Amino acid sequence: LVGTLHPYLGQPIAWVAWLFPAYTIAVVQLTARVPFASLDLGNFGAGAMWLYYAALAGIMLFASQGRSRLEEFRGRFSRALATKVVIGVLALMVILA
């Protein structure tokens, strides 16, 4: 808007505004060079997406319940099994993400 008044007034503002998208692009290009930074999932359907988000929401809800719910869960299942299940679900979510 300032540039419509006079191009020389808008130029410093444009430089400041340019810094943020330039930084974002540089970070994306840098992280894209990391080996296995992305994984092609092929045809990832809407059902799989909703299942992923439902599982993620369930884990977040379970984690937000506090220590009493966690202790109750551990009481029903052995500690080793619970740990393996949580690690397996989190690993699956990382792979799907």
Image (cartoon, rainbow, N blue to C red):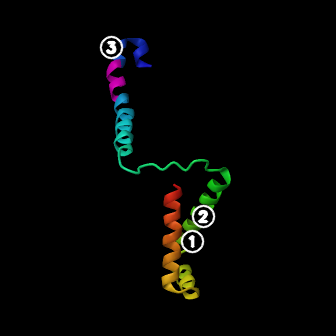
Comes first in the chain, label 3 or label 1: 3
Q: Which residues fall within the magenta stretch?
A: 11-16
Nearer mark to the viewer, of 2 and 3? 2
**Residue 84 location (% of width, % of height):** 49, 76
| x 37%, y 18%: residue | 10
Of 59 and 8, nearer the camera is 59
Q: Quadrant of residue 54?
A: bottom right
Name the quarter where the N terminus is drawn. Answer: top left
Q: Secondary structure at mark 2?
A: helix
First in sequence: mark 2 vs mark 3? 3
Q: What residue lies at 57% left-to-right and 48% top-to-bottom? A: 42
The residue where tag 1 is placed is 62
Q: Earlier in the sequence, mark 1 or mark 2?
A: 2
- Picture quarter containing residue 23? top left
* Residue 55: mark in rendering: 2
What's the mark number on residue 8?
3
Is residue 15 inside the magenta stretch?
yes
Quadrant of the image occupied by residue 5: top left
Camera-side residue of 68 and 25: 25
Q: Residues within 10 Å of mark 3 (few under 14, many from 20)?
A: few
Q: Amino acid at mark 3?
A: Tyr
The reply, left or right, for residue 87 in relation to residue 30 is: right
Look at 36% across and 45% down and name the residue there.
31
Residue toward you, 88 or 11: 88
Hey, what amino acid is under mark 2?
Answer: Ala
Return the x and y of residue 36 as percentages of the image width and height. Answer: 41, 51
Q: Classify 69 as above or below 34.
A: below
Q: Which mark's residue is nearer the viewer, 1 or 2?
A: 2
Q: Pointer 1 and pointer 2: residues touching (CB < 8 Å)?
A: no
Give the foreground label among 3 and 1.
1
